[in-house]
Image (spheres, grey):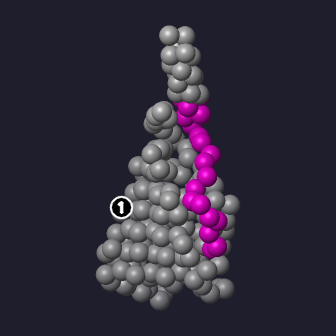
Amino acid sequence: MLNLRSIALGLILAILSTSVVAQGANVNFGTFKADPTLPVEVTSDSLDVNQASGSAEFLGNVLISQGEMRLSAQKVLVIYNQEVGGIDRLEAIGDVVLVNGPDAAEADRAEYTIDNGVIVMTGNVALIQGPSVLTSDRMTINLTTGTANLVGRVKTIINPAKN
């Protein structure tokens, strides 16, 4: 009976400690560090190019690949760096899913700045890592370090180990 109380107390403390850090959480993301210098491959149902603004809009079933990283969305705006050349950033909108190894994240929007390897996901963010799920308003992923920071009403569900 004492052992059961100890387990229950431990679970309560774990839940309370999760509430304390409800404003922000740092976690690992993916099993490997991504390389933002690798080529970016984009496929979609259609493409509109705007030479004046230096952008391209990919629409419908958009899939972006860079090394092992995959990002999908309904619409992706690619903004080119007109001074240096190459891609400056990607803006994904609608049913955004990011996969890196066994980890996946979902959101309404994502912005990927290529040079620094940072993806900022906003709106109904969910990070799925095996049986664990974390939700928040915003998540910043650094692909070069393999880390993520969640802020804004962070919530997690802790599944105790089953014997």
Q: Position of residue 118 (x, y in %)?
A: 61, 63
Q: Which residues are magenta?
A: 18-36
Q: Position of residue 92 (x, y in %)?
A: 44, 67
Residue drawn where x is 40% and y is 62% of the image: 96
Rate crowding at label 1 as few (under 14), some (14 to 19) or many (20 or more) other CA atoms within 10 Å.
some
The residue most toward the bottom is 51
> For this rendering, which residue is in front, 36 or 89?
36
Q: Position of residue 99 (x, y in %)?
A: 48, 63
Residue drawn where x is 31% and y is 75% of the image: 60
Instruction: Say if 126 sits above or below 30 in the image.
Output: above
Q: Which residue is mark 1?
A: 95
Query: What's the amino acid at mark 1?
Result: Asp
> For this rendering, which residue is in front, 108 or 160?
160
| 54 displayed left or right of 61 | right
Per the image, label 1 sits on a secondary structure element best described as strand
| 157 displayed left or right of 48 | right
Q: Position of residue 24 (x, y in %)?
A: 59, 40
Instruction: Say if 54 sits above or below 158 in the image.
Output: below
Instruction: Say if 93 sits above or below 2 in the image.
Output: below
Residue 106 in which image quadrant: bottom left
Residue drawn where x is 58% and y is 56% of the image: 29
| 146 displayed left or right of 108 | right
